[in-house]
Amino acid sequence: MISFDIFQTKIKIHFSFFAVIALISLWQNTIAYDLIMALICCMLHEAGHLLCMYLFSQSPNEIVLYGGGIKIKNSNEKLLSAGAETIILFAGCAVNILLCCISVLIFKKFTYFASANLFFGLFNLMPVKYFDGGRIISNVLNDSPACKLIRILFIIAFAIIIIVMIINGLFSISLILTFVYILISEFFT
């Protein structure tokens, strides 16, 4: 892992991030372009969080780039209200959804950039505790038992969608892997 400081923020780049970049560089076609565009959308998502953090006088303690994305760790120097924290959590998704809308308005069609941004925005709004959406629900509902109920109902609905798709001959390995990831993040972390 490479680690360095920019101002008071520690930047860490994990080996898995370089592995993903190396894999992308092996493809010389639209797959590489799409993966790079997805990485840019992920960075824009995190930039939304960072911008909002600075607006609330929060500085990140650490930014970690790894194969699965980017993680920002807050320094928690100043305690935030649940509302401010919710705004910061929602900011990344809002940036992605806003960029999707702007892209569609400019290009008059649903480009890969627009769809990748829409995907990142909606994916991160899922009510799973590891994602922004789950953390937003926890903030809004003060981590009440209703949070767990919402998460469980979401997982059941997700499972039903997968079953219906399989019954109709629509098998999606990425959807199943996403479901497994959600289960692991919800029940084993």
Image (cartoon, rainbow, N blue to C red):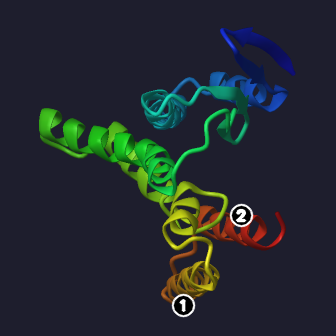
C-alpha span from label 2 to label 1: 22 Å
Foreground pick, 7 / 100: 7
Q: Which of marks 2 and 1 is in front?
A: 2
| Residue type for callout 1 | Ile
Quarter of the image for the N terminus: give it. Answer: top right
The reply to whether discs 2 and 1 touch (Cβ–Cβ < 8 Å) is no
| Residue type for callout 2 | Tyr
The residue that label 1 is drawn on is 167
Checking the image for residue 129, the label placed there is none
Quarter of the image for the C terminus: give it. Answer: bottom right
> Dot 2, how many residues are within 10 Å of its Cα: few (below 14), some (14-19), or many (20+)?
few
Foreground pick, 113 / 122: 122
Residue 160 against residue 8 in the figure, above or below:
below
Residue 111 seen by the camera = no
The residue that label 2 is drawn on is 181
Foreground pick, 163 / 90: 90
